[in-house]
């Protein structure tokens, strides 16, 4: 049974023969694939976790003078960081939120500002696929996350970025040495990334063990880690995450980085009764997500605000 609640999707979504599968090269242990058990380690003195949330609040349609109907959506996003230092409780900082209305068909549609202060940034995507509009909203959130992670890396924080590292790496200035201070933490596995015989060995990792380091096709070093036990009902991949480090750091630095991270990350894994995505949804990240969702406000009120401004637009159009 998949431990994630249905609303969170699935932790394992890879398909054996998906065309997106890649077979990365193992660059540790002489090319052999094996388990490592790093010694438990103290967490870094200046550690932060960066994550974001997004929410679709309304689906929209717009019929133009030509009779063509385009689809769109209104939604919100938030991003921030949970800062964990040795001498203070975890605190949330660098929070930012936004709202957007995204239409298909390549033409943006502006919604009026609501009297209560609700407002949406208009944008558009080409084509007719509503998933592309959803992806645009997700990319907006990820760009905000990446900006926060880059600033914290520059300030000397060891930054755990919740998700693949590619949004952050696109924003890093040339020559910036953030490799040792930046770790990607990927909870969902969408595609096979190793040769089949190696891929099938990953679920054998015990809690606290990591796999041999491998190099991805996008300039990253990565390693699988079983961050905790997911329960006797869970599948083989439950509890496993992928750690990523920029290849610019060099292989030796990357190996040390994932080894150290594997030594202290499990202490942030929540018990099964505390979180719907335990143990992979780390406790500071779960707290950050809860706070960001509160910052977005009531989803029912957000939907009501969209309904009221759309009614205003429709009335204006029908008035002679």
Image (tube, grey):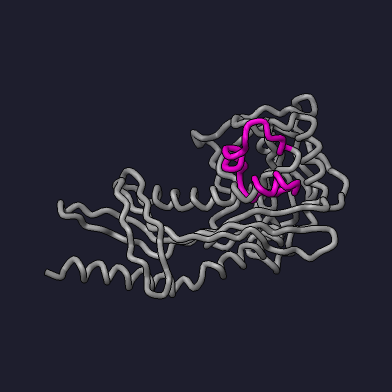
Q: Quadrant of residue 49?
A: bottom right
Residue, x 43% and y 71% (percent of image)? 117
Question: Which residues lie in the magenta part?
Answer: 150-179
Q: Compared to 36, does 77 lie above or below?
A: below
Magenta-span inclusion, residue 11: no
Residue 305: % across, % down:
38, 72
Left or right, 165 with reference to 231? left
Q: Nearer the viewer, residue 14 or 72?
A: 72
Residue 127: % across, % down:
31, 44
Report whether residue 197 is seen.
yes
Report whether residue 233 is seen.
no
Residue 27: % across, % down:
73, 27
Q: Compared to 18, does 271 lie above or below?
A: below
Q: Quadrant of residue 166?
A: top right
Magenta-span inclusion, residue 171: yes
Residue 199: % across, % down:
66, 36
Residue, x 11% and y 69% (percent of image)? 320
Placement of the N terminus among the 4 image quadrants: bottom right
Residue, x 64% and y 47% (percent of image)? 186
Q: Nearer the viewer, residue 18 or 197?
A: 18
Q: Quadrant of residue 318?
A: bottom left
**Residue ranking furthest to the top:** 30
Left or right, 167 with reference to 270? left
Residue, x 32% and y 69% (percent of image)? 309
């Amino acid at each position: 049974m998949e431990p994630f609640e249905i609303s969170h999707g699935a932790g394992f979504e890879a398909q054996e023969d998906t065309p997106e599968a890649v077979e990365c090269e193992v660059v540790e242990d002489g090319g052999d694939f094996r388990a490592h058990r790093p010694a438990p380690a103290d967490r870094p003195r200046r550690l932060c976790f960066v994550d974001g949330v997004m929410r679709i609040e309304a689906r929209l349609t717009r019929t133009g003078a030509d009779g063509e109907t385009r689809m769109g959506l209104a939604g919100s996003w938030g991003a921030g960081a949970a800062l964990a230092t040795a001498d203070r409780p975890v605190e949330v900082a660098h929070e930012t939120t936004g709202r957007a209305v995204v239409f298909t068909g390549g033409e943006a549609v502006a919604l009026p500002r609501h009297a209560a202060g609700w407002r949406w940034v208009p944008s558009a995507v080409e084509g007719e696929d509503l998933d592309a509009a959803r992806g645009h909203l997700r990319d907006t959130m990820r760009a905000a996350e990446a900006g926060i992670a880059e600033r914290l890396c520059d300030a000397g924080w060891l930054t755990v970025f919740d998700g693949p590292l590619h949004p952050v790496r696109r924003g890093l200035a040339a020559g910036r040495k953030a490799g040792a201070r930046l770790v990607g933490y990927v909870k969902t596995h969408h595609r096979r990334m190793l040769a089949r015989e190696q891929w099938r060995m990953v679920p054998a990792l015990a809690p606290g063990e990591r796999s041999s380091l491998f190099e991805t096709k996008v300039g990253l070093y990565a390693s699988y880690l079983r961050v905790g036990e997911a329960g006797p009902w869970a599948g083989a991949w439950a509890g496993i995450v992928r750690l990523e480090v920029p290849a610019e750091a060099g292989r030796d630095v990357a190996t040390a980085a994932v080894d150290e991270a594997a030594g202290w990350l499990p202490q942030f894994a929540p018990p099964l009764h505390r979180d719907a995505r335990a143990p992979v949804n780390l406790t500071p990240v779960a707290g950050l997500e809860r706070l960001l969702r509160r910052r977005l406000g009531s989803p029912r009120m957000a939907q009501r605000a969209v309904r009221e401004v759309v009614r205003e637009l429709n009335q204006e159009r029908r008035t002679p």
